[in-house]
């Protein structure tokens, strides 16, 4: 009888221990899930905050007329050690807003696009800049914008060695980052669809009239 009672007691203890173990495992799983969700939300918040902070720091740039934006880019090029920098934008500029030389002596043509942040720079701009580089026999073609580039524009630029400085690189450049480091990045940093959703929440999606027309046959 005593042995049977002891066996029964141990059985109940085993059941209780098993229940506690299952509960502990469930609690750990739930805690890890909550932690991962909170971390994901924190990362998303940080991304949005970075985009919004960038927007705040560039709010004045967004309000500049096109010529003033070109002058700002030209001034930053001079600060970076570029020489013979001059703004040539306007009627008859043949696609170059700024011309000059990089610190290593290579010739440079620059196209500046100051747009509403919701409007991306399309491939037609980059194709025109490629033609400008060829026309002037320039060593480097650079496109600087206060917004972003479409994926197609990015792809065309990378395939043709055209340097891109988009909004997420413009702010650091205006705050002292070196042009040489931006040339190495060549437009990197725009991210994927998640970053694009964050961008749309911050600035709004392109309106129908802002969107590029589909390519012809």
Image (spheres, rainbow, N blue to C red):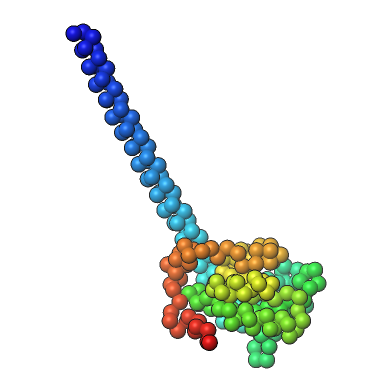
| Count of marks overlaid on the render | 0
State the residue in front, 213 or 93.
213
Going by the image, does 102 lie left or right of 157? right
Q: Which residue reaches farthest left?
A: 1
Q: Is residue 153 above or below residue 3?
A: below
Could you tell me which residue is drawn at 71 percent across and 79 percent down? 109
Q: Is residue 9 above or below residue 124?
A: above
State the residue in front, 214 or 7.
7
Going by the image, does 36 lie left or right of 182? left
Could you tell me which residue is drawn at 65 percent across and 91 percent down? 91
Q: Which residue reaches farthest top?
A: 2
Could you tell me which residue is drawn at 68 percent across and 74 percent down? 160
Q: Return the x and y of residue 69 as percentages of the image width and height.
A: 61, 78
**Visible residue check, residue 61:** no
Give the image quarter of residue 149: bottom right
Q: Return the x and y of residue 73 as percentages of the image width and height.
A: 65, 74
Give the image quarter of residue 20: top left
Q: Is residue 79 above or below residue 45?
A: below
Q: Which residue reaches farthest bottom?
A: 92
**Visible residue check, residue 200:** yes
Q: Return the x and y of residue 195 as percentages of the image width and height.
A: 49, 63
State the residue in front, 70 or 151.
151
Give the image quarter of residue 186: bottom right
State the residue in front, 114 or 76.
114
Going by the image, does 207 lie left or right of 63? left
Q: Return the x and y of residue 118 as percentages of the image width and height.
A: 48, 74
Q: Which residue reaches farthest right?
A: 105
Q: From the image, which quarter does the N terminus lie in?
A: top left
């Amino acid at each position: 009888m005593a042995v049977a009672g002891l066996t029964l007691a141990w059985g109940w203890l085993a059941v209780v221990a098993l229940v506690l173990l299952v509960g502990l495992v469930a609690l750990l799983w739930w805690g890890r899930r909550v932690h991962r969700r909170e971390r994901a939300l924190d990362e998303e918040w940080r991304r949005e905050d970075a985009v919004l902070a960038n927007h705040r720091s560039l709010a004045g740039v967004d309000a500049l007329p096109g010529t003033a934006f070109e002058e700002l880019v030209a001034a930053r090029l001079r600060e970076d050690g570029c020489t013979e920098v001059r703004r040539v934008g306007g009627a008859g500029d043949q696609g170059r807003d700024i011309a000059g030389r990089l610190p290593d002596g290579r010739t440079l043509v620059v196209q500046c696009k100051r747009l509403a942040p919701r409007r991306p720079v399309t491939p037609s701009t980059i194709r025109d800049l490629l033609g400008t580089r060829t026309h002037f026999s320039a060593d480097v073609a650079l496109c600087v914008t206060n917004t972003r580039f479409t994926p197609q524009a990015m792809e065309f630029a990378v395939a043709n060695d055209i340097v891109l400085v988009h909004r997420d690189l413009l702010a650091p450049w205006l705050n002292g980052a070196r042009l040489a480091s931006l040339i190495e990045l060549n437009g990197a940093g725009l991210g994927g669809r998640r970053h694009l959703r964050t961008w749309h929440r911050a600035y709004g999606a392109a309106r129908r009239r802002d969107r590029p027309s589909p390519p012809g046959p």
